[in-house]
Amino acid sequence: MTDELTVVLTSMTPIGELRAAIPLGLLKYELAWPLVFLLAVMGNLLPVPFIIVGLRTVGSRLERREDFVGSLLRWRTHRIKQAWGEQVRRYGFWGVLLIVAIPLPLTGAWSGSLAVWALRVPLRTGFAAIAAGVIVAGTIVTALTQAGISIFAH
């Protein structure tokens, strides 16, 4: 597997997303930052339409299940509604963008996709906000990683 493909696949994961892929590409594989940024953003956005459409298709059924998947989905949906519901209802696009753009644990494209489904955000608005949020998060993570490289290189 190539280094570039590893960056793309890492950015597609629900936990690491581009917060893991960008440092991996820059620090371990020593790829150029514009390439890493582009690969990580593309990889982070690839699963988003499938997640949103998949949740719209089977999300309610999954939530009703009495197993680990149902429990996890109910828990995460409840947390998103509590933490972000008011902001998304009030600010729409910008509320979803914030869920995705803040590069912290339990934020990102996967959480944004879940929020779009759980909070009934229109698909076009939701995807555009997630894409913008991924670009903002990618910019932040790339800048912080590059700054860390510069500081520790001297």
Image (spheres, helix red, strand yellow):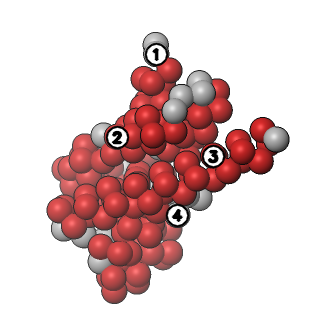
Under circle 3, the secondary element is helix
- Circle 1 packing at 10 Å, graded few (<14), some (14-19), many (20+), is few
**Mark 1 or 3: the one toward you:** 3
Give the Cα separation between the discs numbered 1 and 3.
22 Å
Q: Which residue is mark 3?
A: 146
Separation of residues labelled 4 and 3 (CA atoms):
18 Å
**Dot 4 lies on which element?**
loop
| The image quarter in which residue 133 lies | bottom left
Q: Is residue 22 left or right of residue 120?
A: right
Label 1 vs label 4, nearer the camera = 1
Quarter of image, res 112: bottom left
Residue at which label 4 appears: 102
Q: Amino acid at mark 1?
A: Thr
Q: Is residue 30 left or right of residue 18?
A: right
Up/down of 137 relative to 13, above or below: below
- At 59% from the left and 58% from the top, the residue drawn is 104
Residue position marked by numbered label 1 in the rendering: 2
Q: Nearer the viewer, mark 4 or mark 3?
A: 3
Foreground: 132 or 106? 132
- The residue beneath circle 2 is 42
Hey, what amino acid is under mark 4?
Ile
What is the CA distance from the residue labelled 4 to the residue labelled 2? Answer: 18 Å
